[in-house]
Amino acid sequence: MWCLAIVLILFLSAHNSFGQISPGDLTRAHANLEGMSNCTKCHEVGKKVLSSKCLDCHKEIKALIDQKKGYHASTEVKSRECYSCHNEHHGRNFKIIRFDTLKFDHRDAGFELLGKHNTLTCKACHKKEFIKVKKTQKTTASYLDLGRECLNCHADYHQSTLSTNCASCHNNNAFKPVIGFDHKKTKYPLLGKHQAVECSKCHKIADQNGKKFQKFSGIAFSNCTDCHKDVHENKFGSDCKKCHNEESFKKVAGLTGTGFNHAKTGYVLEGKHITIDCKLCHKVSLTTKLKFSLCSDCHKDEHKGQFHKPGVLSDCKDCHSVEGFKPSRYTVERHNKGDFQLDGAHLATPCFACHKKEKDWVFKGLKKSCADCHENIHRKSIEPKFFGNQNCENCHSTTLWSKVKFDHNTTDFKLTGKHATLTCKQCHFKAAPDGTVQQKFAELTSRCLDCHADTHNRQFDTTQDNSCIRCHDFEKWKPIQFNHDNTRFKLDGKHKDVACLKCHKEVTEGTLRYVNYKLGDKKCSDCHLR
Amino acid sequence: MNKTAHKIFISTMVIIVIASLIILTYVGFNYYRIGLEERFFLPEHETLKPSGYLGHGFGIAGSLMIIIGLFSYMARKRFRRLSRLGYLKHWLEFHIFLCILGPIFVLFHTTFKFGGIVAISFWSMVAVVASGVIGRFIYIQIPRSVEGRELSLNEINVLKSEGNISDLLPDAFKDRPDFTDKSFFARLIGGYNYDRAIFKKLKRDLKNQNLTRVDYKRACKLLQNEISLNRKIDMLVSMRNLMEYWHVAHLPFAMAMMIVMIIHVIVVITMGYRWVF
């Protein structure tokens, strides 16, 4: 019976991997360790499986642990036995390296995944060509010996022209923009307009070694002309900074006297010329020759040739200066050397009052008579013999309009007495019924009643001119010319002392009040009490 | 052990086997149904793997059950000193119980992974169990005494005459041909066909006797016993021979299983896997 049993065992063994006491196939990586004679290569008699035995073969892991590097040296792994993660006897196809890649904390491997690295799959980095150690490269699916340097996985875009410390400029989020890079820390800090210039303008992109390449090192920068074209063609030397700075090519520092000296060009910039943009004059280029002897070489003749005199070279500077178009240097004195001298109120009159009546300034062909400028407010109210050719100066002067110098004695009505003290308008201006003031200088008679009212209510003959003069004169209203003795009633005796109003009573007729001088034939009893 | 106690005894064992199977399946269902290469990554692996707390325990428990079931029955059969200790039939039932439950535990210990030399033990165990089931079939084909001892032909005939079926149907089996001299298949198939036909006829005759329903059922039972005994007599010699041959198969498989199991246990202990010890 026993013999039968042994025969049975041998028979069955032939069909079950003879001599195999393994509890299952080893993984492909350990397939060479199959067989009874190899058990103790991993197992220690009486002590199951020892990690030290694993590390006897896996020297690369041991080296990392000893160096305290990598995941196997992390606190999470260090205290564990190898077989707790890398188990065996689960079949040829068992994945002996398998872990939850989503939950794996990459910091345990001594390399924290930052930025874009977090979005990558493990295989994007842990691939054969990125593994540093050749021996490890042969191992499929190994996570070991991956270089930590950026350039281990990333292509060197700069083709060894820059430092290998990529992190000094780039971060983990994106290759561009280069957030960590500060041009100020380079030997060539960017100033002014240089800050806004696109990088590729100076750092040219080109093909190098069959790859796109942007040059960042070995760029000459000591002279501006290393990058900029010398538009002056070396006329002002190679040191552009003497005149220009990084703020603007057009704002030439020389104009302020610190750099470019415009005087060297033969034309000294003065006044307003100092502050204007170069291009206002140098329209084509700064080096294009310009005429500058006359203002009109640059400036438009605002006066449209009014001052052009045939055969005479005149220039704006006769009247204007570089300090500004206004005020003009044309003085009153110069004006007075001309055909029309300014005096009186004309001295205080602004130029435009006469020279810019409309849109444009007019300096030529202006008429000189008063009426050419001033309105004739008298119109036809003055007789032509006193206002011939509308010559206002017969009466007025430029000093003051109201100051009239007319000699009234040249008229038919000489001013004497009180008349000489009156103002013109007391006789010549009259209020019209419509409220306006009407002037009247002509057609005035010498009749008193043309101006004066007849306060005697026509008791005396007024048909004759100046009939009032029979009694009154121009000095006083009091009728000093009147002699009562020439009347029909001669005053004598006590009558001489009697006040006029004692005999000539005041009469009121309606609204009219007057003194009655016409007493008719008087008897004593008419006045004296009987 | 009276009939009821025996029934409880059998039922308890059946329940234990079925419950064990259900519980073990329930506990490790998720683990066992996963492919071998994935199991390691399941949290249950630590306990249910063959060297795990539970898995190893299943193996030890199953092996002990098999050892006890095997050697206790062998001892009961072989040592005269133990011949008075219970009925052999009950010992066999206990042997069957332990040697079914034990392999179930061993099956779960293997985690359904059958490889290496230990697989010889496992498949031997399967063969032993399978042959045990066949053996049990042959076993019941040989009429036995209450203790389980095989009866001789005379004893069987005495047993037949103790039945009172002849009172009801005196001529029931008088025309039954003797199949004992015929070939194995003629006995098996011819006897079966004859017995089926006569059973139908006799049932009809019984119905004509106006028996009560209970008496009719009892009579039918007696008829079946009679037919069964007749058939067993037909096959007696063949079955006794088969039983002899069966022993030649059953026992070596059991021994092979034991030998390899011992080797397996030695290797495992040598390598340091000692369960809780």
Image (tube, coloured by chain):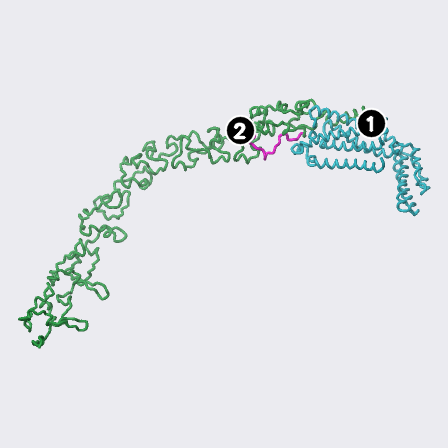
Chain colours: A green, B cyan
Is disc 2 surrounded by few (<14), some (14 to 19) or many (20+) residues within 10 Å?
few
Decide: marks 2, 1 in contact (CB < 8 A)? Answer: no
Distance, label 2 to label 1, CA atoms, is 72 Å
Q: At label 1, which amino acid type do we have?
A: Ala
Q: Where does label 2 land, which residue?
A: A148
Mark seen at residue B99 = none
| Magenta residues (range) | A91-109
Label ID, residue B75: 1
Principal SS element in the magenta part? loop
Tell me where residue A18 appears, x and y as whole percent: 73, 25
Q: Is-magenta flag for residue A334?
A: no
Q: Residue A196's image quarter?
A: top left
Residue extending farthest front: A530
Q: Percent position (x, y) of residue A406?
A: 14, 58
Q: Nearer the viewer, residue A364 or A122?
A: A122
Q: Secondary structure at mark 2?
A: loop
